[in-house]
Image: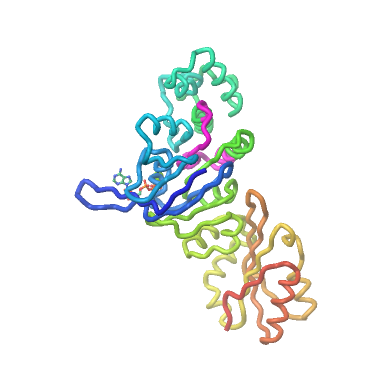
Protein backbone atom coordinates (compact mmCIF):
# COMPACT_ATOMS: atom_id res chain seq x y z
CA UNK A 1 0.00 0.00 0.00
CA UNK A 2 2.88 2.37 0.87
CA UNK A 3 6.48 1.97 -0.26
CA UNK A 4 9.48 4.20 0.44
CA UNK A 5 12.54 3.69 -1.78
CA UNK A 6 15.67 5.36 -0.38
CA UNK A 7 13.71 8.41 0.70
CA UNK A 8 15.48 11.45 2.11
CA UNK A 9 13.98 14.81 2.96
CA UNK A 10 16.11 17.81 3.82
CA UNK A 11 15.16 21.25 5.04
CA UNK A 12 17.16 24.44 5.03
CA UNK A 13 16.63 26.27 8.32
CA UNK A 14 16.36 30.05 8.67
CA UNK A 15 20.07 30.35 9.42
CA UNK A 16 20.97 28.41 6.30
CA UNK A 17 21.67 25.08 7.98
CA UNK A 18 20.69 21.88 6.17
CA UNK A 19 18.72 19.34 8.23
CA UNK A 20 18.09 15.81 7.02
CA UNK A 21 14.71 15.18 8.66
CA UNK A 22 14.31 11.84 6.86
CA UNK A 23 17.47 10.00 5.85
CA UNK A 24 17.50 7.14 3.31
CA UNK A 25 14.37 5.42 4.49
CA UNK A 26 13.17 2.18 2.91
CA UNK A 27 9.93 0.69 4.10
CA UNK A 28 6.83 -1.15 2.99
CA UNK A 29 3.47 -0.84 4.70
CA UNK A 30 0.96 -3.49 3.73
CA UNK A 31 -2.71 -2.82 3.00
CA UNK A 32 -4.93 -3.34 6.03
CA UNK A 33 -2.25 -3.33 8.70
CA UNK A 34 -1.55 -1.02 11.62
CA UNK A 35 2.01 0.21 11.23
CA UNK A 36 3.69 2.13 14.04
CA UNK A 37 6.61 4.52 13.86
CA UNK A 38 8.28 5.32 17.15
CA UNK A 39 11.04 7.76 18.00
CA UNK A 40 11.98 10.69 20.17
CA UNK A 41 11.14 14.30 19.40
CA UNK A 42 12.85 15.49 16.23
CA UNK A 43 13.45 11.95 14.90
CA UNK A 44 11.60 12.80 11.69
CA UNK A 45 8.31 11.01 12.31
CA UNK A 46 5.94 13.81 11.30
CA UNK A 47 8.00 14.53 8.19
CA UNK A 48 7.73 10.87 7.24
CA UNK A 49 3.92 11.00 7.62
CA UNK A 50 3.75 14.16 5.53
CA UNK A 51 5.64 12.34 2.78
CA UNK A 52 2.83 9.75 2.74
CA UNK A 53 0.07 12.29 2.21
CA UNK A 54 2.08 14.33 -0.27
CA UNK A 55 2.28 17.42 1.94
CA UNK A 56 6.04 17.02 1.50
CA UNK A 57 7.80 15.58 -1.53
CA UNK A 58 11.12 13.74 -1.12
CA UNK A 59 14.44 15.49 -1.77
CA UNK A 60 15.58 12.15 -3.17
CA UNK A 61 14.12 8.67 -3.54
CA UNK A 62 10.47 7.90 -4.18
CA UNK A 63 7.26 7.41 -2.25
CA UNK A 64 4.57 5.18 -3.70
CA UNK A 65 1.07 5.27 -2.25
CA UNK A 66 -1.62 2.92 -3.59
CA UNK A 67 0.51 2.28 -6.67
CA UNK A 68 1.21 5.93 -7.52
CA UNK A 69 4.53 7.76 -7.28
CA UNK A 70 3.39 11.03 -5.67
CA UNK A 71 6.21 13.12 -7.14
CA UNK A 72 5.14 12.24 -10.70
CA UNK A 73 1.53 13.40 -10.37
CA UNK A 74 0.12 16.67 -11.67
CA UNK A 75 -1.37 19.06 -9.11
CA UNK A 76 -4.85 17.76 -9.93
CA UNK A 77 -3.83 14.13 -9.71
CA UNK A 78 -2.03 14.78 -6.43
CA UNK A 79 -5.13 16.43 -4.97
CA UNK A 80 -7.12 13.38 -5.99
CA UNK A 81 -4.55 10.92 -4.62
CA UNK A 82 -4.59 12.81 -1.33
CA UNK A 83 -8.30 11.99 -0.96
CA UNK A 84 -7.13 8.44 -0.20
CA UNK A 85 -5.19 9.60 2.82
CA UNK A 86 -6.62 11.20 5.96
CA UNK A 87 -4.96 12.37 9.12
CA UNK A 88 -5.68 12.90 12.81
CA UNK A 89 -3.58 15.01 15.14
CA UNK A 90 -2.51 15.36 18.76
CA UNK A 91 -4.28 18.72 19.05
CA UNK A 92 -7.36 17.51 17.11
CA UNK A 93 -7.40 20.57 14.76
CA UNK A 94 -11.18 20.95 14.87
CA UNK A 95 -13.00 24.09 13.79
CA UNK A 96 -14.23 25.69 16.99
CA UNK A 97 -17.05 27.67 15.38
CA UNK A 98 -18.62 24.52 13.93
CA UNK A 99 -20.67 21.87 15.66
CA UNK A 100 -19.62 18.22 15.78
CA UNK A 101 -21.66 17.28 12.73
CA UNK A 102 -20.50 20.35 10.79
CA UNK A 103 -16.89 19.42 11.51
CA UNK A 104 -17.44 15.91 10.20
CA UNK A 105 -19.20 17.24 7.08
CA UNK A 106 -16.34 19.59 6.22
CA UNK A 107 -14.27 17.28 3.95
CA UNK A 108 -17.46 16.35 2.08
CA UNK A 109 -18.41 19.99 1.66
CA UNK A 110 -14.97 20.67 0.18
CA UNK A 111 -15.41 18.05 -2.53
CA UNK A 112 -18.94 19.29 -3.28
CA UNK A 113 -21.01 16.43 -1.86
CA UNK A 114 -24.75 17.34 -1.78
CA UNK A 115 -25.90 18.43 1.68
CA UNK A 116 -28.42 15.63 2.37
CA UNK A 117 -25.82 13.05 1.43
CA UNK A 118 -23.08 14.59 3.58
CA UNK A 119 -25.51 14.88 6.50
CA UNK A 120 -26.37 11.20 6.25
CA UNK A 121 -22.72 10.16 6.00
CA UNK A 122 -21.70 12.38 8.94
CA UNK A 123 -24.47 10.91 11.09
CA UNK A 124 -23.29 7.36 10.37
CA UNK A 125 -19.70 8.24 11.21
CA UNK A 126 -20.66 9.98 14.44
CA UNK A 127 -22.49 6.82 15.40
CA UNK A 128 -19.46 4.70 14.43
CA UNK A 129 -17.10 6.67 16.69
CA UNK A 130 -19.56 6.55 19.59
CA UNK A 131 -20.73 10.17 19.66
CA UNK A 132 -24.42 9.72 18.78
CA UNK A 133 -26.46 12.42 20.51
CA UNK A 134 -23.61 14.97 20.51
CA UNK A 135 -24.06 16.10 16.87
CA UNK A 136 -24.95 19.68 17.76
CA UNK A 137 -22.34 20.26 20.47
CA UNK A 138 -19.37 22.56 19.88
CA UNK A 139 -15.79 21.27 20.34
CA UNK A 140 -15.39 23.46 23.44
CA UNK A 141 -18.17 21.42 25.11
CA UNK A 142 -16.38 18.10 24.58
CA UNK A 143 -13.71 16.17 26.48
CA UNK A 144 -10.34 15.42 24.85
CA UNK A 145 -11.37 11.87 23.98
CA UNK A 146 -14.62 13.10 22.42
CA UNK A 147 -12.73 15.71 20.39
CA UNK A 148 -10.41 13.01 19.05
CA UNK A 149 -13.48 10.94 18.13
CA UNK A 150 -14.73 13.90 16.08
CA UNK A 151 -11.28 14.09 14.48
CA UNK A 152 -11.52 10.41 13.57
CA UNK A 153 -15.06 10.72 12.17
CA UNK A 154 -13.99 13.72 10.07
CA UNK A 155 -10.91 11.81 8.83
CA UNK A 156 -13.14 8.95 7.67
CA UNK A 157 -15.65 11.15 5.83
CA UNK A 158 -14.14 10.76 2.38
CA UNK A 159 -13.64 6.99 2.70
CA UNK A 160 -9.84 7.08 2.80
CA UNK A 161 -7.72 3.97 2.23
CA UNK A 162 -5.10 5.19 4.70
CA UNK A 163 -5.43 6.90 8.08
CA UNK A 164 -2.36 8.69 9.42
CA UNK A 165 -2.25 9.36 13.15
CA UNK A 166 0.26 11.95 14.41
CA UNK A 167 0.55 11.41 18.19
CA UNK A 168 -3.23 11.00 18.27
CA UNK A 169 -3.33 9.93 21.91
CA UNK A 170 -0.49 11.99 23.35
CA UNK A 171 -2.80 14.68 24.76
CA UNK A 172 -5.10 12.14 26.43
CA UNK A 173 -5.10 10.42 29.82
CA UNK A 174 -4.31 6.68 29.98
CA UNK A 175 -7.96 5.56 30.19
CA UNK A 176 -9.04 7.73 27.25
CA UNK A 177 -5.93 6.67 25.30
CA UNK A 178 -7.07 3.09 25.77
CA UNK A 179 -10.55 3.87 24.42
CA UNK A 180 -9.21 5.70 21.37
CA UNK A 181 -6.76 2.86 20.61
CA UNK A 182 -9.64 0.39 20.78
CA UNK A 183 -11.63 2.57 18.41
CA UNK A 184 -8.69 2.62 15.97
CA UNK A 185 -8.41 -1.18 16.08
CA UNK A 186 -12.14 -1.41 15.50
CA UNK A 187 -12.01 0.94 12.51
CA UNK A 188 -9.02 -0.93 11.08
CA UNK A 189 -10.97 -4.19 11.26
CA UNK A 190 -14.36 -2.96 10.13
CA UNK A 191 -13.31 -0.62 7.35
CA UNK A 192 -10.12 -2.49 6.33
CA UNK A 193 -8.33 0.82 6.44
CA UNK A 194 -4.51 0.92 6.63
CA UNK A 195 -3.37 2.85 9.69
CA UNK A 196 0.06 4.45 10.09
CA UNK A 197 0.58 5.92 13.51
CA UNK A 198 3.48 7.76 15.02
CA UNK A 199 4.14 7.92 18.72
CA UNK A 200 6.89 8.25 21.28
CA UNK A 201 5.19 5.68 23.53
CA UNK A 202 6.07 2.01 23.15
CA UNK A 203 2.84 1.16 25.01
CA UNK A 204 0.85 2.37 22.01
CA UNK A 205 2.94 0.24 19.63
CA UNK A 206 2.58 -2.74 21.94
CA UNK A 207 -1.17 -2.54 22.09
CA UNK A 208 -2.29 -2.00 18.52
CA UNK A 209 0.48 -2.32 15.92
CA UNK A 210 1.33 -5.22 13.63
CA UNK A 211 4.67 -3.83 12.46
CA UNK A 212 6.88 -1.13 13.91
CA UNK A 213 9.77 1.02 12.70
CA UNK A 214 12.05 2.70 15.22
CA UNK A 215 13.34 6.08 14.04
CA UNK A 216 16.32 8.05 15.26
CA UNK A 217 17.89 11.07 13.54
CA UNK A 218 15.84 10.60 10.39
CA UNK A 219 16.82 6.97 9.96
CA UNK A 220 15.02 3.73 10.63
CA UNK A 221 17.28 1.89 13.03
CA UNK A 222 15.09 -1.18 13.51
CA UNK A 223 11.93 -2.51 11.89
CA UNK A 224 9.83 -5.66 11.98
CA UNK A 225 6.83 -7.44 13.46
CA UNK A 226 5.99 -6.03 16.88
CA UNK A 227 6.22 -9.44 18.50
CA UNK A 228 9.72 -10.01 17.09
CA UNK A 229 10.91 -6.56 18.14
CA UNK A 230 9.63 -7.24 21.66
CA UNK A 231 11.33 -10.64 21.71
CA UNK A 232 14.69 -9.52 20.35
CA UNK A 233 15.19 -5.77 20.38
CA UNK A 234 18.57 -5.23 18.67
CA UNK A 235 19.32 -1.56 19.13
CA UNK A 236 19.98 -0.07 22.60
CA UNK A 237 17.25 2.50 22.05
CA UNK A 238 14.73 -0.20 21.14
CA UNK A 239 15.72 -2.26 24.18
CA UNK A 240 15.10 0.75 26.42
CA UNK A 241 11.73 1.32 24.78
CA UNK A 242 10.69 -2.31 25.23
CA UNK A 243 11.81 -2.28 28.86
CA UNK A 244 9.70 0.81 29.49
CA UNK A 245 6.50 -1.13 28.78
CA UNK A 246 4.63 -4.04 30.23
CA UNK A 247 3.83 -5.06 33.76
CA UNK A 248 6.85 -5.44 35.99
CA UNK A 249 6.43 -8.38 38.27
CA UNK A 250 8.78 -7.00 40.86
CA UNK A 251 9.65 -3.37 40.44
CA UNK A 252 12.30 -3.27 43.13
CA UNK A 253 14.20 -5.90 41.20
CA UNK A 254 14.57 -3.65 38.21
CA UNK A 255 17.10 -1.54 40.07
CA UNK A 256 18.77 -4.71 41.07
CA UNK A 257 18.91 -5.78 37.48
CA UNK A 258 20.45 -2.46 36.47
CA UNK A 259 23.26 -3.16 38.87
CA UNK A 260 23.36 -6.92 38.38
CA UNK A 261 27.05 -7.06 37.73
CA UNK A 262 27.66 -5.72 41.25
CA UNK A 263 25.06 -7.89 42.87
CA UNK A 264 25.97 -11.05 41.01
CA UNK A 265 29.69 -10.84 40.38
CA UNK A 266 29.75 -14.57 39.73
CA UNK A 267 27.56 -17.01 37.86
CA UNK A 268 25.36 -16.66 34.81
CA UNK A 269 22.43 -14.42 33.96
CA UNK A 270 19.98 -15.92 31.52
CA UNK A 271 17.12 -14.16 29.82
CA UNK A 272 14.08 -16.34 29.22
CA UNK A 273 11.36 -15.40 26.77
CA UNK A 274 8.00 -17.08 27.11
CA UNK A 275 5.35 -16.86 24.43
CA UNK A 276 1.61 -17.49 24.35
CA UNK A 277 2.15 -21.29 24.64
CA UNK A 278 4.76 -21.29 27.39
CA UNK A 279 3.87 -18.23 29.48
CA UNK A 280 1.98 -20.31 32.06
CA UNK A 281 4.64 -23.05 32.48
CA UNK A 282 6.19 -23.37 35.96
CA UNK A 283 9.43 -24.32 34.22
CA UNK A 284 11.87 -22.44 36.45
CA UNK A 285 10.69 -24.16 39.62
CA UNK A 286 10.53 -27.52 37.84
CA UNK A 287 14.12 -27.31 36.56
CA UNK A 288 15.42 -25.97 39.85
CA UNK A 289 14.00 -29.05 41.55
CA UNK A 290 15.04 -31.48 38.83
CA UNK A 291 18.72 -30.45 38.85
CA UNK A 292 18.70 -29.44 42.50
CA UNK A 293 20.17 -26.00 41.88
CA UNK A 294 19.01 -22.66 43.30
CA UNK A 295 17.68 -20.33 40.60
CA UNK A 296 17.11 -16.67 41.54
CA UNK A 297 14.57 -14.71 39.57
CA UNK A 298 16.18 -11.32 39.06
CA UNK A 299 13.50 -9.72 36.94
CA UNK A 300 10.23 -10.60 35.28
CA UNK A 301 7.90 -8.72 32.99
CA UNK A 302 4.77 -9.44 30.97
CA UNK A 303 3.95 -7.69 27.68
CA UNK A 304 0.41 -7.88 26.36
CA UNK A 305 0.72 -7.37 22.62
CA UNK A 306 -2.04 -7.04 20.05
CA UNK A 307 -1.77 -10.70 19.10
CA UNK A 308 0.34 -12.42 21.75
CA UNK A 309 1.29 -12.34 25.38
CA UNK A 310 4.98 -12.32 25.97
CA UNK A 311 6.80 -12.99 29.23
CA UNK A 312 10.40 -12.10 29.98
CA UNK A 313 12.40 -13.30 32.92
CA UNK A 314 15.98 -12.90 33.93
CA UNK A 315 17.37 -15.60 36.18
CA UNK A 316 20.70 -16.03 37.94
CA UNK A 317 22.45 -19.35 38.55
CA UNK A 318 25.88 -20.53 39.60
CA UNK A 319 26.63 -23.92 38.04
CA UNK A 320 29.32 -25.80 36.20
CA UNK A 321 29.66 -25.39 32.46
CA UNK A 322 28.21 -28.85 31.68
CA UNK A 323 25.17 -28.30 33.85
CA UNK A 324 24.63 -24.86 32.35
CA UNK A 325 24.46 -26.42 28.89
CA UNK A 326 22.02 -29.04 30.15
CA UNK A 327 19.82 -26.40 31.75
CA UNK A 328 19.77 -24.22 28.63
CA UNK A 329 18.82 -27.23 26.56
CA UNK A 330 15.98 -28.06 28.98
CA UNK A 331 14.53 -24.59 28.56
CA UNK A 332 14.77 -24.85 24.79
CA UNK A 333 13.15 -28.31 24.86
CA UNK A 334 10.24 -26.80 26.79
CA UNK A 335 9.80 -24.17 24.07
CA UNK A 336 11.22 -21.35 26.17
CA UNK A 337 13.84 -19.19 24.55
CA UNK A 338 16.96 -19.00 26.72
CA UNK A 339 19.80 -16.60 26.12
CA UNK A 340 22.90 -16.09 28.24
CA UNK A 341 23.28 -12.36 28.83
CA UNK A 342 26.18 -12.40 31.29
CA UNK A 343 28.56 -15.16 32.21
CA UNK A 344 31.43 -15.04 34.64
N1 LIG B 1 9.43 22.67 7.50
C1 LIG B 1 10.58 22.50 8.16
N2 LIG B 1 11.61 23.36 8.04
C2 LIG B 1 12.77 23.17 8.69
N3 LIG B 1 13.03 22.13 9.49
C3 LIG B 1 12.05 21.23 9.66
C4 LIG B 1 10.78 21.35 9.02
N4 LIG B 1 10.01 20.31 9.38
C5 LIG B 1 10.76 19.55 10.22
N5 LIG B 1 11.99 20.10 10.38
C6 LIG B 1 13.08 19.56 11.21
O1 LIG B 1 13.22 18.18 10.87
C7 LIG B 1 13.49 17.40 12.01
C8 LIG B 1 12.42 16.33 12.16
O2 LIG B 1 11.18 16.96 12.47
P1 LIG B 1 9.82 16.15 12.67
O3 LIG B 1 8.78 17.15 12.99
O4 LIG B 1 9.60 15.28 11.50
O5 LIG B 1 10.16 15.26 13.95
P2 LIG B 1 9.18 14.42 14.89
O6 LIG B 1 9.83 13.10 15.05
O7 LIG B 1 7.81 14.46 14.36
O8 LIG B 1 9.27 15.22 16.26
P3 LIG B 1 8.12 15.42 17.39
O9 LIG B 1 8.04 14.13 18.14
O10 LIG B 1 8.69 16.53 18.24
O11 LIG B 1 6.85 15.80 16.71
C9 LIG B 1 13.56 18.38 13.19
O12 LIG B 1 14.89 18.72 13.42
C10 LIG B 1 12.77 19.56 12.68
O13 LIG B 1 13.20 20.75 13.30
MG1 LIG C 1 6.01 15.19 15.10
Quarter of the image where one finds residue 340: bottom right
User: Which corner quadrant holds the C terminus?
Assistant: bottom right
Image vertical order of residue 298 relative to residue 10, above or below = below
Instruction: Tell which of 275 and 53 is nearer to you.
Output: 53
Residue found at the very far left of the displayed protein: 15
Left or right: residue 276 compared with residue 17: right
Res. 24 visible in picture: yes
Res. 138 visible in picture: no
Instruction: Tell which of 193 and 184 is nearer to you.
Output: 193
Left or right: residue 216 compared with residue 239: left
Left or right: residue 237 compared with residue 133: left
Q: What stretch is highlighted in magenta?
A: 156-181
Residue appearing at x 44%, y 18% in the figure = 112
Quarter of the image where one finds residue 320: bottom right
Residue appearing at x 65%, y 66% in the figure = 313
Residue appearing at x 42%, y 45% in the figure = 63
Residue 172 included in the magenta stretch of the image: yes
Instruction: Tell which of 218 and 135 is nearer to you.
Output: 218
Whole-percent x and y of residue 51? 40, 43
Whole-percent x and y of residue 211? 56, 51
Whole-percent x and y of residue 269? 61, 75
User: How is the rendered protein coloured?
Assistant: rainbow
Residue appearing at x 24%, y 47% in the figure = 13
Left or right: residue 15 compared with residue 234: left
Whole-percent x and y of residue 158? 50, 27
Amino acid sequence: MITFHDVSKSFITNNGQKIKAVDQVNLTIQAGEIFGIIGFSGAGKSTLLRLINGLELPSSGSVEVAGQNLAQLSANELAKARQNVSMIFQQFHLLWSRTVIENVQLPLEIIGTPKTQSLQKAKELIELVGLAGLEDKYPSELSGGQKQRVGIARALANDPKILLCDEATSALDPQTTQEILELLININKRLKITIVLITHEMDVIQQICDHVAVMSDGRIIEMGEVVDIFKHPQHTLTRQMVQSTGIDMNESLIDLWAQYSNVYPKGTLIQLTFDEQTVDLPIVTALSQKYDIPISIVYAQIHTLKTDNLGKMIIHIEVEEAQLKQLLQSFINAGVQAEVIDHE
